[in-house]
Amino acid sequence: MKWGIDVSEHNGAIPWGSLKKQGLSFGILRLGWGQYHLDERFYENSNGALAAGIEAGIYYYSYALTPEEAAREARFAAFILRDAGLSPERLSMGCWLDMEDADRYKEKNGLTGGPAITAISAVFLEEMERQGYPAGIYGSWDWLSHKIHVPSLPPGTPVWCAQWGRECNYPDASLWQFTNTLRLEGMELDGDICMK
């Protein structure tokens, strides 16, 4: 079983070499968020993880309120990946869209309905595919079960489910974020398990 972490600039500097020695298999790295916002540690994390022999993937936190904004976010993500020299083959843990609403930005701007959120998510995923970077969808079990209608996303869209605890109840999830309190090297991180 492969286990890993997902990280962003908020986690600070990640000691990838030390984590590799502890058995870390993969890291999923935030590339950015919203319209043209790059995670300030993305290049550092992608270079560090790959140099340490850790499999890498990326996620993008969307602030899109319209299909057009979602397509722009996807094009920006693909541009950064190409700039970083990260072909799809180098991203063995894939690309992921995080369409949740942790800070309630979408809700405050009137984007609350599941069908609209699903449609915007689908546009991001379709544009990533067009750019040569197939992507999956990330969300909590509740979000995936009640907000995003996964069957309406592009066929074969993989799912990364966040459900903290002892088991993942989302059927056929590819990745499972099982905790946000994994203690490693004095840090508290999100922990993930590869289910496939």
Image (spheres, grey):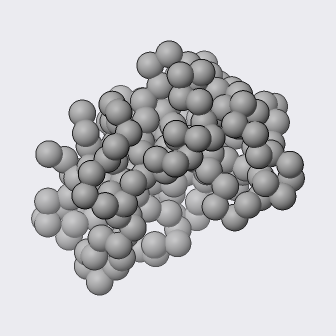
State left or right for residue 80 relative to residue 165.
right
Q: Quadrant of residue 166?
A: bottom left
Above-or-below relation of 148 to 1: above
Figure quadrant of residue 171: top left
Toward the viewer: 14 or 99?
Answer: 99
Left/right placement of residue 126 relative to residue 25 reads right
Which residue occupies the extreme bottom position in the image? 186
Q: Quadrant of the C terminus?
A: top left
Taking the spot 50% from the left edge, 63% from the top edge, the residue there is 8
Quick check: can you spot residue 170?
Answer: yes
| Residue shown at 69% from the left, 64% from the top | 103
Residue 45 at x, y percent in the picture: 42, 59
Instruction: Provide residue 143's location: percent of width, then percent of height.
Output: 56, 46
Q: Position of residue 83 (x, y in %)?
A: 56, 41
66 vs 145, nearest the viewer: 145
**Residue 70 spot, x, y in % from top left:** 73, 36
The answer to whether residue 84 shows anywhere in this view is no
| Snapshot quadrant of residue 69 | top right
Residue 64 located left or right of residue 139: right
In the picture shown, does residue 43 fall above or below 85?
below
* Residue that sits furthest to the top in the current view: 155
Tell whether 133 sits left or right of 35.
Answer: left
- Which is nearer the eye, 14 or 67? 67
Q: Hey, which residue is sitting farthest right in the picture?
A: 109
